[in-house]
């Protein structure tokens, strides 16, 4: 038992060291003052987002980019509130092209259907996706355009941060988000992209059609970002890039109940077994096993007291390692993480990881008023 745990933790430390190294390899991008060239179609699916849309619409209105060079396409996914009326009112005052489409369902994934419908009706060469509960930075498109002109990518993945008012549930989601962003950026630094976030994602429209869009995984409700990333990096391994810039950080709203937090993560985990990336599966399995060990260590310290100091040392090393990972990402996002406030996170995270993994085996989860089954 002790040797198995030692090997497991050693593998975890090596993996996290690679993440840290990869994160540092991705350079910060600073946009030069150049004439805008790229044309963007911003795609925003929505379902019952009346509470969040006013904030999003304000940030869209404040985008620092020529109004004739971008359009905004909202896709109504069977909303039951006044979301559409809020957008319609904003359209009357808009300085740029904005339209509302109705989602046309043809698969098990409402969001993929919505994005596909928007792309079919888009006018410009670049598709940029975000979510209705997000806030966009004013230089989002300007910086993205400068990056495209300099690097000639086919897909650009951007950073996302969870907002937090400092309470327990929001702090957890923000710090968990930092860990995911650290792995995302680190994997790009090692030229093995593993993750991206559809709240801040851009790709060329003709390439989307070239790889047949979401075909092949549209039976899976989630994964509009990850499965597209896998297709893109297979077809264009050097032209799928991460834009590491503070000017393009998209803020997203955290969940307000633990039930929604767990459902959200089960939704994320439900697509894992369908991923084709061996690295993703191995890393996911390693993280799962290490987190089971974290929960088991207190019991092992009681029943194998002769190794209690060793177990305690492993747990402390795990906490330090996680803190380094989260702190590195937090610094990029302009946040400070105090170590003593971080101490509780690994235990909460371990409990949630174990619950979510077992929950994803069942496959059923609820999201935005709908129930989905594992495919």
Image: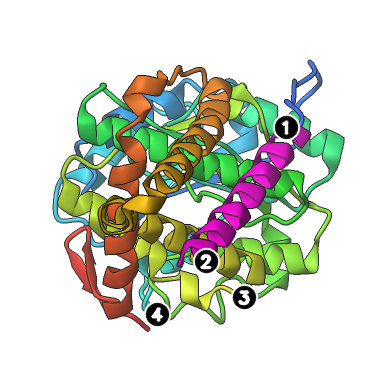
Residue 4 among those drawn in magenta: yes
Residue 226 on image: x %, y %:
55, 61
Give how far apart the Cα atoms at labels 1 and 4 are. 42 Å
Task: Kindly identify which residue carries mark 1.
Answer: 24
Q: Quadrant of residue 358?
A: bottom left
Task: Kindly identify which residue carries mark 3.
Answer: 276
Residue 61 on image: x %, y %:
44, 25
Residue 183, compared with residue 375, is above or below; it is above
**Which numbered marker is on residue 106?**
4
Q: Residue placed at 80% from the left, 62% from the top? A: 236
Residue 160 among those drawn in magenta: no
Give how far apart the Cα atoms at labels 3 and 4 are. 24 Å
- For the N terminus, the image quarter is bottom left
Of discs 1 and 3, which sits in the foreground?
Answer: 1
Residue 256 on image: x %, y %:
18, 40
Of discs 1 and 2, which sits in the foreground?
Answer: 2
Colour mode of the rendering: rainbow
């Amino acid at each position: 038992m002790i040797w198995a745990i030692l090997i497991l933790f050693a593998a975890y430390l090596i993996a996290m060291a690679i993440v840290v190294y990869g994160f540092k390899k991705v350079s910060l991008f600073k946009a030069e003052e150049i004439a805008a060239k790229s044309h963007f179609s911003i795609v925003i699916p929505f379902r019952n987002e009346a509470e969040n849309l006013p904030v999003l619409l304000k940030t869209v209105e404040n985008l620092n980019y020529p109004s004739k060079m971008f359009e905004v396409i909202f896709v109504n996914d069977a909303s039951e509130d006044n979301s559409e009326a809020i957008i319609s009112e904003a359209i009357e005052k808009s300085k740029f092209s904005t339209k509302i489409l109705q989602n046309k369902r043809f698969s098990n994934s409402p969001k993929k259907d919505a994005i596909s419908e928007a792309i079919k009706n888009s006018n410009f060469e670049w598709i940029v996706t975000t979510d209705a509960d997000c806030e966009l930075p004013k230089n989002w498109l300007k910086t993205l355009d400068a990056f495209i002109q300099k690097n000639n990518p086919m897909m650009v993945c951007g950073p996302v941060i969870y907002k937090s008012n400092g309470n327990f549930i929001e702090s957890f989601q923000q710090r968990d988000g930092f860990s995911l962003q650290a792995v995302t950026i680190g994997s790009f630094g090692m030229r093995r992209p593993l993750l991206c976030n559809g709240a801040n994602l851009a790709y060329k429209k003709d390439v989307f059609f070239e790889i047949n869009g979401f075909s092949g995984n549209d039976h899976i409700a989630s994964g509009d970002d990850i499965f597209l990333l896998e297709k893109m990096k297979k077809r264009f391994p050097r032209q799928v890039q991460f834009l590491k810039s503070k000017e393009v950080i998209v803020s997203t709203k955290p969940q307000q109940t633990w039930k929604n937090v767990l459902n959200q993560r089960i939704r994320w985990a439900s697509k894992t077994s369908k991923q084709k990336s061996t690295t993703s599966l191995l890393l996911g399995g390693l993280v799962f096993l290490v987190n089971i060990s974290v929960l088991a260590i207190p019991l092992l310290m009681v029943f194998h007291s002769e190794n209690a100091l060793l177990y305690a040392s492993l747990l402390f090393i795990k906490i330090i390692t996680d803190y380094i990972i989260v702190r590195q990402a937090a610094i990029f996002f302009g946040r400070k993480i105090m170590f003593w406030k971080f101490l509780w996170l690994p235990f909460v995270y371990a409990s949630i990881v174990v619950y979510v993994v077992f929950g994803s085996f069942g496959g059923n989860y609820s999201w935005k008023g709908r129930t989905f089954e594992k495919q």
